[in-house]
Amino acid sequence: MTAPETVVSPKKSEVFSLRAILAPMLAIICGMIMVIMDGTIVNVAIPTLVELFSTNLITFQWVITGYTLAMAAVIPVAGWLTDRFGSKRIFLLTIILFTLGSALCSMAQSIEQLIAFRILQGLGGGMVTPIGIALVFKLAPPERRGTVLGMLGIPMLVAPALGPILSGWLMQEASWHWIFLINVPVGTLALLLGHKFLVNDKGRNSHPLDYVGVVLAPIAFALLTYGLSESGNSWSSSTAIAALAAGGVLLLLFVIAELRHPYPLLELRVFRSSPFNRSIVMLWIVQITLFGTMLLIPMYLQNIRGITPFESGLMTLAHALAAGIANPFGGRMFDRIGIRPLAFIGLSLIAAALFILTSITTATDLFIVIVSLILLGLGTGFTMMPLNTHILSSAPPHLVSRVTPLTTSTQQIVISFGAASLAGYLTSRIAWHQSASGHSLKSEAMGFADTFLLAACIASLCVGLSLFLGRPQREQIKQSERMKGEQSK
């Protein structure tokens, strides 16, 4: 009797586990896919929206910057909120905020309203992914977690590539309102499924919230980002200087408060590790370069080359496909050869792609742009995930659990810095060429080329820095243990 039970029981457990989590998984995937997609869906629409709202690029970049800064502000408190009030309750609240923000964005009558509603979106969207991953981890039985988390990886790969294409198609076939309205039915479905099928876990006692950090961090980073964007007009601007100075002071106060708090919003003590510092600074520089570039390319294609938003969305798909192909290969190679050669190759590809783009004109063959996008995608796939893995490996062992909120939130902050700084630089270079040669598409194209040159120089700096990446001590220990095991065999 024991043998049949041993054979049948796992099969029943396997079927039951997959069927039982299908509905709650769908709720989580719906929530995650709309949030992740929203990170790229606006890029293709920038030229059209700048014109429709009668604004300029420096002002409009706050539609993206406000969203990313809001996400960065709430990511570190996601864990505290779920501990205090329960993961299901907070997950549903974040879906409501994001869906409401999306609906309001579609009804915006001015650029100020659009920025405010995007901030509301970010406050909801920032917590969807970390809470969603935690919920899935609770749903899956230990022996099935790898399979289930693999299912969750689908929206994380598909959504960024789908965003620009869907945005271009909606702009062409419907109107700009639908790039935000598309989230309403998806969010409503996620809300209904989540309310019905997610487990209603109760909150529990949690450590005190770092209120000082919650207040200081968003204000400091918003002021610094505002100062960077204003510097695009003039570095001597009193507004830019005041914003940068005030942001710097608040940032210093934030660092002091975090180092003294027993449960800080962001665990800054991890920066005492030199390998961690080198890795994360490099990751930040790469993200500034990549995110800024992926903002610029659709603008060049539409403003200078005159192609439709849908066509520019299709062209940027080359980057996503190349990154998707290189990403798993980069992960396998990281396990074999470590971060240094992989980062050197990936960053060299990114730098090469950007140097190609420095030669763009009003008549550059679009095939060259596609080749550059493919090189960028390959470089991204070889670099981003291995660098993230290396950062976790470089952190002191007792602080590893606190590293993910730090890296996730700072990445959003860095993305906002990248958008603000490159948008400001592009505006200033276009203005300089127009003052020298007159208002023309040629002057605008030269401004884009100059901005790509700046990005290429930054990427080249990263190529040099990659040579200083070492193997973390914990990786060295693991590698030596593996070698000893192979020798004993």
Image (cartoon, grey):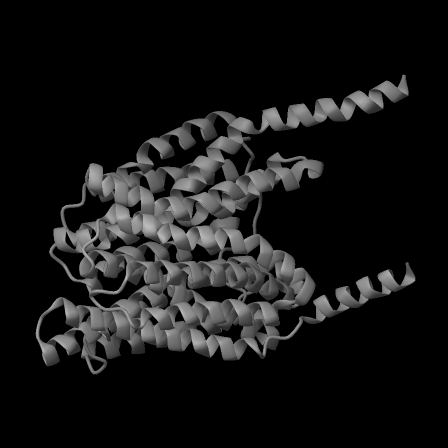
- The quadrant where residue 352 appears: bottom left
**Does 92 appear above or below 60?**
above
Q: Quadrant of the N terminus?
A: top right
The answer, for residue 65, to whether it is visible in the render is no
Q: Residue at x 24, y 38 (%)?
A: 178
The answer, for residue 135, to whether it is visible in the render is yes
Q: Residue at x 56, y 34 (%)?
A: 201
Residue farthest toward the top in the current orientation of the protein: 1
Residue 450 point in image, percent of width and height? 27, 75
Residue 244 point in image, percent of width and height? 30, 76
Disc tally is 0
Whether residue 296 sits left or right of residue 265 in the image: it is left
Q: Quadrant of the C terminus?
A: bottom right
Whether residue 226 sits left or right of residue 74 in the image: it is left
**Does 321 appear above or below 444?**
above
Residue 112 point in image, percent of width and height? 18, 54
Query: In the image shown, does 363 or 152 lie closer to the viewer?
Result: 363
Query: In the image shown, does 460 or 405 lie closer to the viewer?
Result: 460
Query: In the image shown, does 173 or 258 lie closer to the viewer?
Result: 173
Residue farthest toward the bottom in the current orientation of the protein: 236
- The quadrant where residue 486 appears: bottom right
